[in-house]
């Protein structure tokens, strides 16, 4: 990257990994298209939504709670998460992140290196509620 990357949230790709998933990703930095050493996304969890139990063999993953409340289950420990909290997972850590609040949970999620599953997800759109949280009006 020979110049700064600037992108408005409304111009980011939105995707869901699979149709049954209860979280979606607003990709703010695409490691391939943007030639960056990491992936960055706003991850949006539906009410009662959660990730499946999984781990990343090679990636560190960070969650920073922007809005809402969640719970993370990581290698046998449980962490209640609220706005302003940060959770960092090292490669190989089994984990689930779930929304335990009455509204959607919004996290800034960063992965180093990237996760191809997120990049390969099915495109979708944000509704007005998501747009109000992550973006200024068009």
Image (cartoon, grey):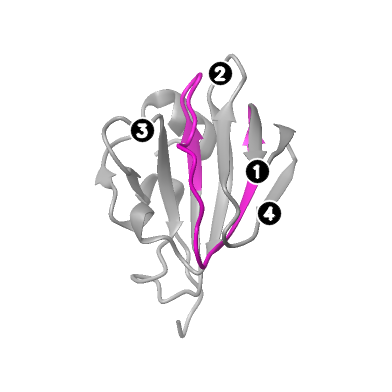
Above or below, comparing residue 89 to residue 68 in the picture: below
Between residues 136 and 55, which one lies in front from this camera angle? 55
Q: How many marks?
A: 4
Q: Which residue is mark 1?
A: 74
| Residue 54 within the segment the image draws in magenta | yes
Question: Which callout, 4 or 2, points at the residue further toward the start of the chain?
Answer: 4
Q: Which residue is mark 3?
A: 21
Place of residue 134 in the rendered image (x, y in percent of width and height, measured from the top left): 51, 38
Between residues 66 and 85, which one lies in front from this camera angle? 85
Q: Which residue is mark 2?
A: 103
Disc 3: CA contacts within 10 A as few (<14), some (14-19) or many (>=20)? some
Q: Which residue is mark 4?
A: 88
Residue 135 makes an appearance in the image: no
Position of residue 78 in the picture relative to residue 19 (left or right):
right
Task: Residue at 57%, 36% (x, y): give it.
Answer: 97
Question: Which callout, 3 or 4, points at the residue further toward the start of the chain?
Answer: 3
Real-space Cα separation, disc 2 to disc 1, in angstroms: 23 Å
Disc 4: CA contacts within 10 A as few (<14), some (14-19) or many (>=20)? few
Q: Residue furthest bottom?
A: 2
Question: Which callout, 3 or 1, points at the residue further toward the start of the chain?
Answer: 3
Which portion, as a residue range, is magenta? 42-68
For numbered disc 1, what is the local secondary structure?
Answer: strand
For numbered disc 4, what is the local secondary structure?
Answer: strand
């Amino acid at each position: 990257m020979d110049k700064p990357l600037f992108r408005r949230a409304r111009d980011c790709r939105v995707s869901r990994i699979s149709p049954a998933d209860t979280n979606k990703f607003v990709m703010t930095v695409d490691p391939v298209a943007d030639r960056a050493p990491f992936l960055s996304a706003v991850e949006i969890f539906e009410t009662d939504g959660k990730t499946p139990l999984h781990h990343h063999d090679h990636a560190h993953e960070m969650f920073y709670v922007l809005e809402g409340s969640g719970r993370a289950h990581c290698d046998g420990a449980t962490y209640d998460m609220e706005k302003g909290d940060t959770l960092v997972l090292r490669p190989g850590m089994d984990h689930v992140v779930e929304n335990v609040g009455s509204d959607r949970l919004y996290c800034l999620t960063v992965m180093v290196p990237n996760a191809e599953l997120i990049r390969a997800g099915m495109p979708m759109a944000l509704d007005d509620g998501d747009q109000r949280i992550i973006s200024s009006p068009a």
